[in-house]
Image (cartoon, rainbow, N blue to C red):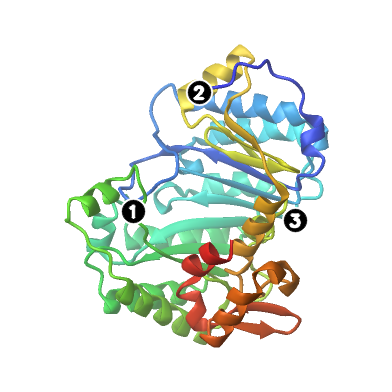
Amino acid sequence: MLKTESLKTEHSLARSARHLYIHIPFCLQICPYCSFYKDIAGPGKADPLVDAVIREAELFGGNCAPETVFIGGGTPTALSVSQLERLFHGMRRSLDFSGTSEFTIEMNPATVTARKADLLRTFGVNRVSMGVQSWDPELLKVLGRVHDADQVRKSFSILRAAGYDNLNLDLIYGVPGQTLAQWEDSLQQTIALQPDHISAYCLTYEEDTEYFERLQRGEFRENTEQDAGFFECGVELLSAAGYAQYEISNYARPGRACRHNIAYWEGADYLGLGPSAWSTTGDRRWQNVPDTAAYVRAMQAGIRPIATEEILPAETREAEKIAFGLRMNAGIDPSTLARRRDLVTSLREEGLLEDHGPRVRLTARGRLLADEIAAELI
C-alpha cells in the first residue's frame, strides 16, 4: 500500500548515493518472460510520468551527484524525442551530473533512431545497452520481441555513427526450444558486430510472468544440464573473441565493464526514481509503488511514492555483498566468510571455491552453482 506521508526534501538520503537508477516502464509490447515492472506505452501516459520523475528528482536536489546513471525499464526510448528532451532538461535542473563518468540507457532495437541517438549524446549518455536476446527469427517470436535481426544491425550502425563507443548487447539462453547451434549462431553474430560489452543471461521463470504460468502448466520444462552447456559455450566463445568474463553473465572489452552494475554488486548506496524503482542508502531501503498511475497520482498530490520501506540490519547488507560478490570473477575478501569456515572448507574440497590473489572466488564449476552456493553462504 502506498505511504501517505507528505513529500519532503530528501537531501540527507542523497549524500551517500553515488549511483542513480531511473525506471521508465513503457514497452511497445510485453515480453512473456520479463518480471520487471512494465506498462504498455499508450496515449496520455508518458507525459505525466515524465513530469512525475522530474518532480521526484527535485526531492534530492543538488546533493545527488551520481558517478553512474542507468535509465532502464521497460524501454526508455519508447518515449518520444520531445519527452526524452523534457526528461533530461528536468533532471539537469535538480541533479548534478558534472561528475558522471558512465551514463547508460537501455534501448530496444525497434526504438533506435538517429535523432534519439544524437539527442541522448547531447545530454551526456555515453553507454547504450540494447536488448537483442536472439538472432533467430523463430526464437524472437517465442520471446515476444518486436524487432528482427536486420533492425539490430541497423540500430547498432546508427549508434556507432552517433559516436557511441561503449555499446552492450543483451542475449538470452535457455529459451524454450533453443538448440546449442542456435545459441552459438547468436553468439557469433553478436561477436561479428564487435560490441564493447556482451551480457548473456540464462532465462529464468519468474512469478507473475506468462512463462512461469506455462511452466506450471507443464508446457515448458527447465533443463539445468542443457543450460550449463549453453553457459560453458558462451564462456568459451566470448573469451576466445577477447571478451573477459567479469561476472557470471557479463563480458567486456578492457575498460568496458559496467561500473553501475559493479557498484550494485559491491554493495554501494544508490537511488532509484520512477515507478517500482528501489533505493538503498545507509541502513534504509525502499521501493516506489510498482504502478505507473499510482506513482503519478502520488507525485501530483505531494505524497511520497513509496510502497515499502525497511531498516536493513548490517548482517543483511554483508550477506548481500557476499552473494553478489561471488558472482564476480574478482571474488571477495575472505574475511567476510570468517563465520562460515566449515562451509568454505567444504566448498574448497569440492572444487567450487578457490583463492584468487588475496581474494576468494568461485571456480569455473562453482559459477554453474552460484545461486545455490550463495544461498548456503548467506
Q: Quadrant of the C terminus?
A: bottom right
Q: Earlier in the sequence, mark 2 or mark 3?
A: 2
Residue 289 seen in the current view? yes
Q: CA distance from mark 3 to mark 1?
A: 30 Å
Q: CA distance from mark 2 to mark 1?
A: 36 Å
Q: Earlier in the sequence, mark 3 or mark 1?
A: 3
Q: Which residue is mark 3?
A: 101
Quarter-wise, where is residue 310 in the image? Answer: top right
Of circles 2 and 1, the one toward us is 2
Front position in the image: 30 or 354: 354
Amino acid at dot 2: Met
Left or right placement of residue 264 versus residue 180 in this view: right
Quarter-wise, where is residue 188 in the image? Answer: bottom left
Front position in the image: 95 or 176: 176
Left or right placement of residue 333 versus residue 369 in this view: right
Residue 21 lies, in percent from the top left, at 63, 44
Q: CA distance from mark 2 to mark 3?
A: 36 Å
SS of the residue under disc 1: loop
Instruction: Determine the residue positioned at 61% across, 52% down.
Output: 104
Amino acid at dot 1: His
Amino acid at dot 3: Ser
